[in-house]
């Protein structure tokens, strides 16, 4: 039951991420931490929840790292946004750190 709830939350977070990345810029909630910090923390949290829900955190991390770049590229197609390489790198870094953290925690929690 917990894993099903985590999977549902991870899918909802991924949909929210797509909306936040590609929706109208003036509809976004901005916590005023700075673009790069917001992207890093956002991808970190979403990747962490998704890695806890799905069994292969390295694949989840790689997919979300690619998504960080893809969303930045797709922002070039929207009328009110511009893609930014450093923002994509910060998002990918958050996904990488979350997947590595999940992998490490799962390794440490595994009985010998």
Image: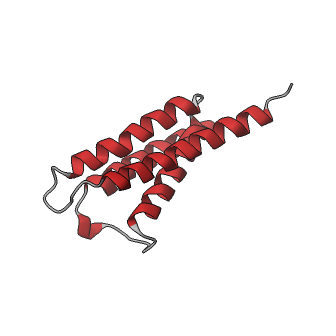
Say which of 56 and 96 sits in front. 96
Apparent side of residue 54 relative to residue 32 in the rendered image (left or right) = right
Image quadrant containing the N terminus: top right
Q: Residue at x 37, y 45 (%)?
A: 68
- The answer to whether residue 8 of the structure is visible from this angle is yes
The location of residue 4, given as percent across then percent down, is 57, 37
The location of residue 18, given as percent across then percent down, is 33, 49
Residue that protrudes farthest toward the top in the picture: 112
Say which of 29 and 97 sits in front. 97
Q: Where 8 sits versus 62, above or below?
A: below
The location of residue 86, given as percent across then percent down, is 36, 54
The quarter holding residue 112 reads top right
Apparent side of residue 52 relative to residue 95 in the rendered image (left or right) = right
Q: Residue at x 29, y 49 (%)?
A: 72
Residue that protrudes farthest toward the front in the picture: 86
Q: In the rendered picture of this protein, how many numbered marks are placed on residues? A: 0
Residue that protrudes farthest toward the left in the picture: 79
- The answer to whether residue 46 of the structure is visible from this angle is no
Q: Residue at x 16, y 54 (%)?
A: 78
């Amino acid at each position: 039951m917990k894993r099903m709830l985590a999977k549902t939350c991870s899918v909802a977070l991924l949909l929210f991420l797509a909306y936040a990345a590609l929706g109208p810029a003036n509809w976004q909630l901005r916590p005023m931490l700075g673009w790069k910090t917001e992207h890093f923390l956002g991808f970190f949290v979403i990747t962490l929840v998704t890695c806890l829900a799905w069994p292969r955190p390295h694949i989840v991390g790689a997919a979300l790292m690619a998504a960080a770049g893809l969303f930045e590229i797709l922002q070039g197609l929207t009328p009110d946004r511009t893609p930014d390489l450093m923002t994509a790198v910060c998002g990918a870094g958050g996904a990488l750190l979350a997947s590595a953290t999940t992998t490490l925690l799962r390794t440490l929690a595994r009985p010998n």
